[in-house]
Image: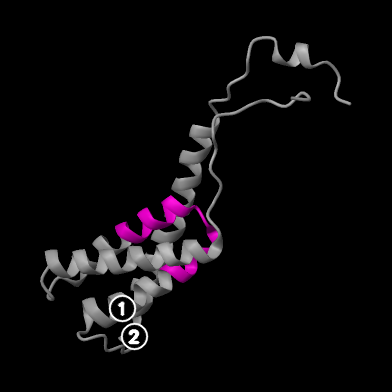
Amino acid sequence: MNGSVSTLTRTRPWDTEFAIAAGFAAAVAGSALAAWRFPPDAPGARLIVLAVAVAAGTALTRSARACLPAAVIAWLFCDGFLIDHYGELRWHGWGDAVRLAVLAGAAYGGVVAGRICEAGAGSGRVEAAGEREADGPAG
């Protein structure tokens, strides 16, 4: 093994394209769940459900490059389907800016949480007894 330490299978962050698609899927699922569970006159509760879904999606992918696109896609779903109806997009002033900031924070928080969990799982390194000594010098 040339002095390398064998580790448990460790995953890497997804490719950006797949992570953006996963963010889109999280936005669709979160929007559907929020619309199903909460009435139109509860936009705060709907936003919380969507933010949790986006955070879960970005925690799964752990892609920092895809967290902002996931937040923007989720914000478009929030604006078009959870705040307004029938997919109609309108600017609502500071309320929209706050919703976008909440979703962006949730997306980035999901990436951080996913990477923390990965680091915790990746710290369980496995090394066979005497493996380094048996390999001798690399070369």
Q: Name the outermost residue toward the right.
A: 139
**Count of labels in the image:** 2
Mark 2 packing: few (<14 Cα in 10 Å), some, or many (20+)? few
Q: Which percent across, then down, holds residue 50?
A: 28, 64
Q: Residue at x 47, y 71 (%)?
A: 69
User: Mark 1 near mark 2, Cβ–Cβ under 8 Å?
Assistant: yes
The image quadrant of residue 95 is: bottom left
Q: Residue at x 83, y 15 (%)?
A: 136
Mark sitting on residue 121 = none
* Residue on which the image places disc 2: 93
The residue type indicated by label 1 comes to Gly
Mark sitting on residue 95 = 1
Mark 1 packing: few (<14 Cα in 10 Å), some, or many (20+)? few
Foreground: 36 or 84? 36
Q: Which residues are magenta?
A: 52-70
Where 51 sits versus 96, above or below?
above
Q: Which percent across, then down, holds residue 112?
A: 48, 50
The image quadrant of residue 139 is: top right
Q: Residue at x 53, y 26 (%)?
A: 124
In this picture, residue 128 sits left or right of residue 73: right
In this picture, residue 132 sits left or right of residue 106: right
Foreground: 25 or 34? 25
Tell me the chief SS of the magenta region. helix
Q: Which percent across, then down, holds residue 86?
A: 21, 86
Q: Residue at x 50, y 40 (%)?
A: 118
Q: Helix, strand or loop at disc 2?
A: loop
Q: Which percent across, then down, holds residue 82?
A: 22, 76
Q: Helix, strand or loop at disc 1?
A: helix
Distance (Cα) linking label 1 and label 2: 5 Å
The residue type indicated by label 2 comes to Gly
Is 58 magenta? The answer is yes
Where 27 sits versus 130, above or below?
below
